[in-house]
Image (spheres, grey):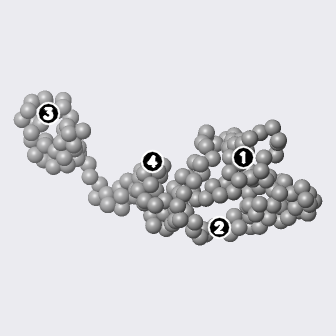
Amino acid sequence: MSIFPTLMSNTHTNLVLKKPKSESSIRKVWIPKTVAYILREWRQIQDQYKEYLAQDYSDYNLVLTLPNGRPVENRIMEKEFSKLREKAGLPYVVFHSLRHSSTTYKLKLNYGDLKATQGDTGHAQIDMITDVCAHILDEDRKVNAQKFEATFYAKNPVNPLKDVKPPEETGTDLTNLIAALEQSPELVAMLTKALKG
């Protein structure tokens, strides 16, 4: 844990950097090359600030800092993230939502490899990943249904209503309805499902 000194003498609060919640939170993380390049550029900018500010630069060996080396408070990150979100025309989300989005896209890119994604997120339980991200994957489930339709039913389309005559031709008596159901097991299945639903 690191407790950073206050900047103003009239305050009694300190910014605190806590240790991770568990030992498993301390882990190796693989990042995309582009992110590594961005971090390398940021490090060069920090070195320029250090040189320019000399003893006025507070070096705490942090990755994300203010220009003077001080840690970035979460309220500052939230404020800047909010500006960026509004400028991009994105819906309202909090900064922490990026963690969920990252997890979801990793699952999509690695075709649902839960263990690899769990290793990246550091979640102790795999159901944390599936519970948090399941609602976002509804569009993928819709695509799955479309692929299933194209793969299994394209050559032999099922049309349970093709042999059923309109009511004006058959009348509305029970005998005709039973005859129609006997001719179409698919229609029976659909009707059963509708009645249960």
Distance Cα–Cα, label 2 vs label 1: 34 Å
Distance Cα–Cα, label 3 vs label 1: 83 Å
Residue underneath mark 4 = 135
Kindly identify the amino acid type of the residue bearing the numbered disc 3: Thr
Q: Residue at x 59, y 48 (%)?
A: 96
SS for callout 4: helix
Q: Quadrant of the C terminus?
A: top left
SS for callout 3: helix
Q: Residue at x 20, y 37 (%)?
A: 195
**Rendered location of residue 49, percent (x, y):** 88, 59
- Label 3, residues with CA under 10 Å away: few <14, some 14-19, many ≥20: few
Circle nearer the viewer, 2 or 1: 1
Of the image marks 3 and 1, the number of the one nearer the N terminus: 1
Give yes or no for contact between labels 3 and 1 (Cβ–Cβ under 8 Å): no
Residue farthest toward the left in the current orientation of the protein? 175
SS for callout 1: loop
Of the image marks 3 and 4, the number of the one nearer the N terminus: 4
Kindly identify the amino acid type of the residue bearing the numbered disc 4: His
**Rendered location of residue 110, percent (x, y):** 50, 66
Residue underneath mark 2 = 32
- Label 4, residues with CA under 10 Å away: few <14, some 14-19, many ≥20: few
Q: Which mark is residue 170?
A: 3
Of the image marks 4 and 2, the number of the one nearer the N terminus: 2
Of the image marks 1 and 4, the number of the one nearer the N terminus: 1
